[in-house]
Amino acid sequence: MAKGPSEPPIPKDKSETARAAIRAELTAAPVSARELGARLGMREKEVISHLEQVALGARARGERLQIEPPVCEKCAFIFEDRERLTRPSRCPGCKGERIHAPLFSLVAR
């Protein structure tokens, strides 16, 4: 059974940039890159590249990109030291592939 988005993506306002839209979504609640992509009508890969730039720009605004690390569902291994923003493909502990994606949010310093 294929999983589809629960509601159609909201068309982006042409006056708002992709990064501004991502920043707005990140201030509301922690969200994964896949959820951001679904909400904004973007591919997950595009969202990741924008997130890297949002993290750099957040410092100038007195904010920081907070990342809740991915967690393995099978053995509860937490990927604390992971620097990449993407979801890992496999757990180093149990070799399981069911891993919760990292969650992102913007917080004030």
Image (cartoon, grey):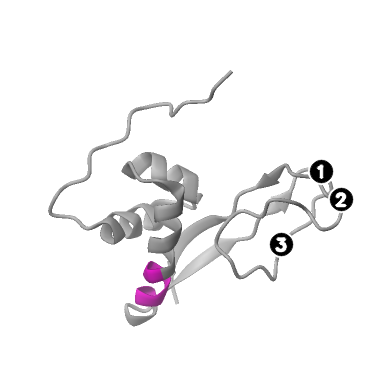
Residue 15 belongs to magenta span: no
Cα distance in 3D space between marks 3 and 2: 13 Å
Q: How crowded is mark 3: few (under 14 residues within 10 Å), some or many (20 or more)?
A: some
Tag 3 residue: 79
Q: Quadrant of residue 17?
A: bottom left
State whether residue 63 appears in this view.
Answer: no
User: Residue furthest toward the bottom?
Assistant: 60
Q: Is residue 97 left or right of residue 42?
A: right
Q: Out of 108 and 53, give the one closest to the viewer.
A: 53
Amino acid type indicated by mark 2: Cys
Magenta region, residue range: 53-58
- Residue 59: x and y in percent read 39, 79
- Residue 56: x and y in percent read 40, 76
Tag 2 residue: 94
Q: Which of marks 1 and 2 is nearer the N terminus?
A: 1
- Residue 30: x and y in percent read 49, 53
Q: Out of 11 and 45, give the one closest to the viewer.
A: 45
Quadrant showing the C terminus:
bottom left
Instruction: Tell whether label 2 touches label 1 (CB within 8 Å).
Output: yes
Amino acid type indicated by mark 1: Lys
Q: In this view, does 77 lie to the left or right of 48?
A: right
Disc 1 on helix, strand or loop? loop
Q: Residue at x 28, y 54 (%)?
A: 21
Number of marks in the image?
Answer: 3
Residue 56 belongs to magenta span: yes
User: Residue furthest toward the left?
Assistant: 15
Q: Is the magenta stretch mostly helix, strand or loop?
A: helix
Cα distance in 3D space between marks 3 and 1: 13 Å
Tag 1 residue: 74
Q: Which of marks 3 and 2 is nearer the N terminus?
A: 3
Q: Which of marks 1 and 2 is in front?
A: 2
Placement of 64 over or under 40, stated as above or below: below
